Image (cartoon, grey):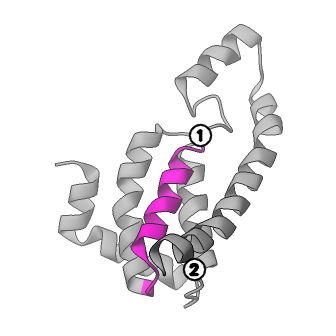
Amino acid sequence: MNVAQALGSTGGAALIGDAVSKMLGGSTSTYAVIAVLFIVPAICTQFMNNIPVAQSFQPIAIATCLSIGVDPRLGSLAVGFASAASIATPMASVAQSMAMGAGEYKFTDYLKCSLLPLVIYSIVLVIWAPLAAKILWGV
């Protein structure tokens, strides 16, 4: 049984989803929910492989969105995009680890080059996703 199935079947995803909704302070703002559901996995994927991050956070995102009343497809979208944002550290992907040795890069070099694109990426997602959902899904 994988982590996502275990979280869903044991109720762990719902428990974490409720905790995340409490962290939002009762806010049901779609933008706030998408921001949180992007930021947390995006940080995790800098230190872990992106596939386990996506698989672990998908049920949490869906449970959080259902708990708050936000379309769960938006939460799933935020987690998917966050999992693909593995660019800020050499541990984020194998190619970056290999480039670090060959190019004699330092950890700080990765941060300098990737923080601005990550911020732009997150802002675009948080603004774009709800607008796209209105157009595509009528949400």
User: Is 21 placed above or below 98 here?
Assistant: below
- Amino acid carrying mark 1 in the image: Ser
Left/right of residue 134 with respect to residue 113 in the rendered view? left
Provide the residue designation for mark 2: 30
Judging by the rendered image, the residue that carries numbered circle 1 is: 86
Instruction: Tell whether position 84 is magenta.
Output: yes
| Left or right for 101, reference 80 | right
**What type is the residue that disc 2 sits on?**
Thr
Q: Main secondary structure of the magenta part?
A: helix
**In which quadrant of the rendered view does residue 106 lie?**
top right
Q: Which residues are magenta?
A: 68-85
Task: Report the residue that reaches farthest toward the top.
Answer: 102
Give me the disc on residue 49: none
As displayed, is residue 105 above or below residue 47? above
- Residue at the image position 70 percent from the left and 8 percent from the top: 102
The percent coordinates of residue 65 (x first, y second) are 43, 77
> Gap between marks 2 and 1, in whole Å?
24 Å
